[in-house]
Image (tube, rainbow, N blue to C red):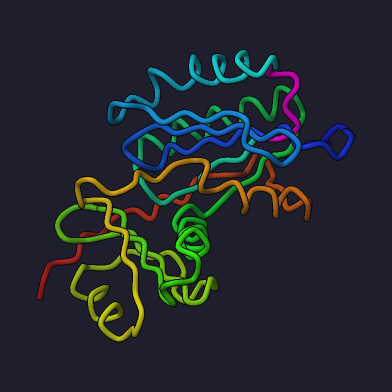
Amino acid sequence: MQISKRKLMSNILIIDTANAKLSLALLAKENIVGQYLDASDYSHARNITLEIEKMLSSNSMKISNLDAVAVNEGPGSFTGLRVGSSIAKGICFGLEIPLIKINGLEAYAKYFYKALEGKYQDIFILLDARRDNYFFAHSSMGEIQTQTTFLHIDEIEKKINESLSTWVYNSKNEGEVKLQATFLAEEVLNKWKNKDFEDISSFEPQYLLNNYQAKK
């Protein structure tokens, strides 16, 4: 589909439905001007449309003011990814604006390296995939070392133990900061500036369907 020509602005909606909680962010001129993190789990389909409208309205915007939509492509919640990708593709198709995909776990790993001010060399992001399996990514000094994959916790712990200075995010641990759309903002802006856009008609989320691995 031909993308209409627009000024190089940056009203970008970020949709993150890969995790248990729906999360949204709104960028305007490279700044985060709106954000939303659902209080309940797995309410993506019920709340996403209303919360997008509310966030735009609170910033005196209409959906037609968007210049692009970015979406966490996964891996993560199968149903959540379907909801997020469908909404993102629908908006982009209707407005003829670019679609940006973000590998969530890898973007989170880069985000936490900077957020923790480089205090830890290796960042491990673990997203629960049940039965002691995880969707997993690993960065070292802010660069991705292990691209997003699906591993049993025993294999991940081997990699963690081989590292010297580590910080681990595990989605199963209570009380930890919740993964959210604002953490994806830097990667989104990088792709926007480089015009790294997706073909709307062929885009599909990264489901990484689980062939559950038995503990050996």
Q: Residue at x 53, y 44 (%)?
A: 204
* Left or right: residue 177 compared with residue 73: left
Image vertical order of residue 80 relative to residue 136, above or below: above
Q: Residue at x 27, y 51 (%)?
A: 171
114, 63: nearer the viewer: 114
Q: Is residue 66 magenta?
A: yes
The picture places residue 201, in percent across and down from the top left corner, at 65, 38
The picture places residue 200, in percent across and down from the top left corner, at 66, 39
* Left or right: residue 185 compared with residue 75: right
The picture places residue 66, in percent across and down from the top left corner, at 72, 27
Q: Is residue 118 magenta?
A: no
Q: Quadrant of the N terminus?
A: top right
Check the image and name the residue furthest to the left: 216
Q: Which of the 4 image quadrants contains residue 32? A: top right
How many numbered callouts? Answer: 0
17, 9: nearer the viewer: 9
* Left or right: residue 180 compared with residue 55: left
Image vertical order of residue 167 relative to residue 27, above or below: below
Q: Which of the 4 image quadrants contains residue 131? A: bottom left
Q: Residue at x 11, y 70 (%)?
A: 215
Q: Quadrant of the C terminus?
A: bottom left
In the rendered structure, which segment of residues is drawn in magenta? 62-68
53, 200: nearer the viewer: 53
Q: Which of the 4 image quadrants contains residue 97? A: top right
The picture places residue 55, in percent across and down from the top left corner, at 56, 20
